[in-house]
Image: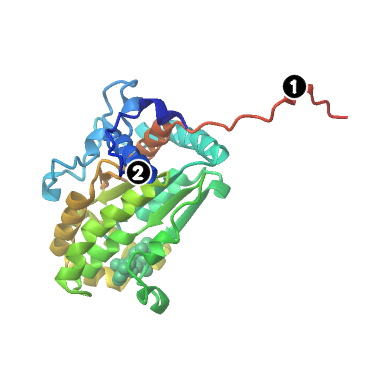
Amino acid sequence: MSTQSNLPNISTSSNTSVTEQAAARATIDVASEMQPEKTVVNKLPPKPDYPRYRVRPEQPIVLAALDPNECEDYGKKKHVEEELERQRKRIQNLQERLYAEHQRSLLIVLQAMDTGGKDGTIKHVFGGLNPQGCQVWSFKKPSDDEANHDFLWRYHQRAPQRGMISIFNRSHYEDVLVVRVKELVAKEVWQERYHLINEFEHMLTLNNIRVIKFFLHISKDEQKRRLESRLEDPSKHWKFSSNDIKERKYWDDYQTAFEDAINNCSTAYAPWYVVPANKKWYRNLVVARTIADTLESMNPQYPPAEVGLENIIIE
Ligand code: ATP
Ligand code: MG
């Protein structure tokens, strides 16, 4: 891979092992990618400026201050359709290169309040990907087997193999969200998990897995509208869960838990993006473009061809 020549010099003491040096170099290299999509975005016109949705580690966010209705100057779905298609094509091409390179992979975490649009995002952003290079994992209440292991066990098993894109529909963040709000473990237990999650994601990053995380930000009114439309429209009845009504009562607690998770775990190497998601089409565009830009900044390369291909004659 190409980054070796850009690595900073690290002073080493004689008792530092080669492995430790390599890990330190990789960490610094990752930290220098504080703006994972920057290289690409800088070449494009300043607007739309999607990196602004990235949460900077040094600048904690307040969810109530972020507008879920934001959609730049786009008025309607049809105004973004062409642009969304362009971003999907970029993702498709870059996915092929990532798969062919077979060295690195991408983990995309999707989190939201109920009805926030995780399923819709998966359908509309990833619909055109080669299924061979992409896996979606949905995490529900842990099974007995999962609950009998450490909390990261089931997520680690689903981390992407080389060349793959994995999408986590809910994720290890549930263990500081629902688990915190519903008091499924003691405060001392979930509090320690922010740090453990950062370590986990750091470990994945050092193992060539790029991690990006999206919070699809909807308003409480928008959730009401979506729940009502699921009740009114018979073709949406299957999506309705009375559990969502119960969880809605904890809206404020969930917002606080999300805020803490995002602020504690948006790191240089594994950033959180808070995506305005009241308008589904704008949400899709922001997610698609951020993924395309991230993949492009990874710059996956086709592996070198076998030597002597030019001399081969097919008989
Ligand atoms: P959809 O409703 O779109 O089908 P979903 O992700 O909401 O998808 P559900 O089966 O409705 O799926 O809900 C899954 C539930 O599992 C959520 O209430 C979530 O909070 C819960 N859950 C996920 N991870 C954990 C966990 N680690 N501990 C406890 N509960 C969890
Ligand atoms: Mg649900």
Residue at position x 30%, y 29% in the image = 9
Quickly name the residue at label 1: 310
Dot 2 crowding, Cα within 10 Å, few <14, some 14–19, many 20+: some
Q: Position of residue 44 (x, y in %)?
A: 33, 21
Of residues 49 and 82, the one nearer the viewer is 49
Residue 217 percent coordinates (x, y): 23, 50
Q: Position of residue 161 (x, y in %)?
A: 50, 51
Task: Give the mark nearest the N terminus, 2 or 1.
Answer: 2
Camera sees residue 210: no
Quadrant housing the C terminus:
top right
Give the secondary structure at mark 1.
helix
Q: Dot 1: few (<14), some (14–19), or many (≥20) neighbours within 10 Å? A: few
CB of mark 2 near ligand 1 (< 8 Å): no
Give the residue type at disc 2.
Ala
- Number of callouts in the render? 2
The residue that appears at 49% across and 53% down in the rendered structure is 135
Q: Which quadrant of the figure has residue 298?
A: top left
Most distant residue in the bottom direction? 144
Residue toward you, 161 or 261: 161
| Residue 255 against residue 18 in the figure, above or below | below
Q: Is residue 256 left or right of residue 86?
A: left
The spot of residue 191 in percent (x, y) is 17, 64
- Please tell me in which quadrant of the rendered image residue 256 appears: bottom left
261 w.r.t. 239: above or below = above
User: Which residue appears at 37% of the width and 77% of the height?
Assistant: 148
Mark 2 to mark 1 CA distance (whole Å): 40 Å
Identify the amino acid type marked 1: Glu
- Reply above or below: 13 against 123: above
What residue is shown with label 2? 23
